[in-house]
Amino acid sequence: MAANVALDALLHEHRRFPPPPELSASANAQPEIYDEAAKDHLAFWEQMAERLDWAERWDHVLDWELPYAKWFVGGKLNAAVNCVDRHVAAGRGDMVAFHWVADAEHDRRDVTYADLHREVCKAANALTELGIQAGDRVAIYMPMIPETVVAMLACARIGAPHTVVFCGFSAEALRGRILDCNCRAVITVDGQFRRGSPAPVKPTVDDAVAACPDVRHVLVVRRTGDEVNWQDGRDHWWHDAVDPQPEEHEAQAFDAEHPLYIMYTSGTTAKPKGILHTTGGYLTHVSATHHYIFDLQPETDVYWCAADIGWVTGHSYIVYGPLANGATSLMYEGTPHPGDKDRWWKLIEEHKVTILYTAPTTIRTFMKWGAQELQRYDLSSLRVLGSVGEPINPEAWIWYHTYVGGGKAPVVDTWWQTETGGILITPLPGITEAKPGAAMRPFPGISADVVDDEGKPVPNGSGGFLVITQPWPGMLRGIWGDDQRYRHTYWSRFDGVYFAGDGAKKDEDGDLWLLGRVDDVMNVSGHRISTAEIEHALVGHPSVAEAAVVGATDAITGQAIVAFVTVRGHVADDDAGGERFVEDLRNHVATAIGPIAKPRQIMITPELPKTRSGKIMRRLLRDIAENRELGDVTTLLDPTITDMIRERMADRAEEHEG
Ligand code: WTA
């Protein structure tokens, strides 16, 4: 109770949090960094690139032919060498790269940089022996285990771009990605552990690759030891293929613009976009941002990014950024759940974690469980807290700062996207003031603005669309195989600038507040999911005629998926039959995309609200889903429909309460 009163007081003061003085003097970022970068942003990025090891230096910093950028033109480097070999060569081989902790409490393993070097070299040799060459694409479908990092770095080492697919995606989703970028091989596991129980993974891969004729090899890490089906010739155990390999591998240096990876993300159509990232600029961007934004001190910090490697946050801030910087990280296989409410705090106390990076949805879950879950642990080691994935509400920000950060650790709210490769908007701990809920300012060397409908910058105190006005090193180099879509999605809305798809406002001081997506992309627990993708899955069900999906505000997950469907023919609409059908539809979506895409609620309705020209009015459905007054209904073909849907929703809600 007392704690809540204190929170209210903090909120109502519209608090500003000055940088903690004890951090300011010694922080990696000093105030001059902003001016220096503003004076000459190319010189700034060049300086950042010098933090890496290059086999050949670049001729010039940037070739920019809108919308295509080339950074560090003519330079050559190897990403894996930068993430591993150079630390070993510098005598830091015994430093721990990952304290890996399994879902099961007793299962843990420390992986040093020397271990990582040995394993990456062996895996690179194994991939080469299987015939994988520079330029071939390799899919990785794995949980949070050290071999996932080894697999990614082994691909990078031989110049084979990887595409990591989140291990919760369905066979259909995995297949779509494998086919889209035409992968030669898949690296996976027999199964994974989730909340203490083993769950099969390889059957999903078997199902996916059955229709992927170009996949010649499936490399399988033994994780659960469960029985799996085996296709001789195609399937290889990781331990058979990798363990006997030589521990040395001579790495070739690749062009700065050599593709490093493709990461699929949701857009406004049903088909996910393959976002392409290349080597030199990306590595420069993620290592520089990681160094300054988290104030990483590699000899003393224990850094924990609690994302999954299957998303971009895991790529940039579990793998490439931290490893390029020689960080010691905690890597945790599990996720918070009600049966294990204090596991995180135990881990932080035990490993003396100093930097924590997570998503607002997780913070809100912890808030719901209550501060008592963490107050019995010593979290005083924490000195920087990061947030990513969705706008952080001031309540969550203050709770994070107060309880997790002991009222002293600065919170950095970091805005970025799969497309941007690394963080673009953020405070810098030690030098910038923070305001709960604001991402504050562009990182040095980044130029962002908020513009109105016509693309004109809005004055302080107003809102509009977020745009990035100069190319940056970590930016996407395109959408795999779809130049047209790349130009259209990001470069056609406003002339000459990158359109992020997010709304934002500049406050009276000119500081930036991110307001969420302005397109049909939802953000559910920090995961990007497109309404079109779920609608596509729903209409793929034989009994569904039409579907409209909206993201409704949700106190924990940020947004929640609500679907409205009309059915073909007759579906039993007595209570039991209706509920069974809805459950069947939810499972259908999980099978088509993955459990993260399961709608929270599906409403069966005789019709959808449409305009006279036949467009579904999602705006009204969102009003209904959020139980709000309806906006303008004058363009509706049949205004009685919205009332009917609303009544049905109310009936359902009553049934559930009753
Ligand atoms: C949202 C995740 C507000 C935003 C790194 C963006 C945020 C989308 C923030 C990208 C933040 C991410 N504040 N919104 N700090 N961080 N977003 O590609 O809408 O999975 O466009 O990349 O998440 O999601 P993605």
Image: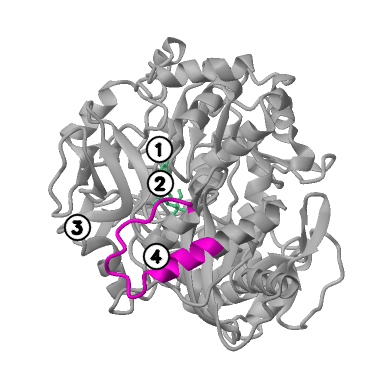
* Mark 3 → mark 2, Cα distance in angstroms: 19 Å
Q: Is residue 412 above or below residue 480?
A: above
User: Chief secondary structure of the magenta span?
Assistant: loop
Residue behind mark 2: 422
Question: Is the Cβ of the residue at disc 1 closer than 8 Å to that at disc 2?
Answer: yes
Name the kind of residue labelled 3 in the image.
Trp
Is tag 4's residue or tag 2's residue first in the polypeptide sequence? Answer: 2
Residue behind mark 3: 64
Name the kind of residue labelled 1 in the image.
Thr
Residues in magenta, as a range? 626-647
Image disc number at residue 289: 1
| Ligand 1 within 8 angstroms of badge 3 C-beta | no
Question: Is the Cβ of the residue at disc 1 closer than 8 Å to that at disc 3?
Answer: no
Q: Quadrant of residue 447?
A: top left
Badge 2 element: loop
Residue behind mark 4: 618
Image coords of residue 44 (percent x, y): 26, 37
Q: Nearer the viewer, mark 4 or mark 1?
A: 4
Is tag 3's residue or tag 2's residue first in the polypeptide sequence? Answer: 3
Tell whether position 164 is magenta: no
Q: Nearer the viewer, residue 162 or 9?
A: 9
* Mark 1 → mark 3, Cα distance in angstroms: 22 Å
Image coords of residue 558 (percent x, y): 51, 46
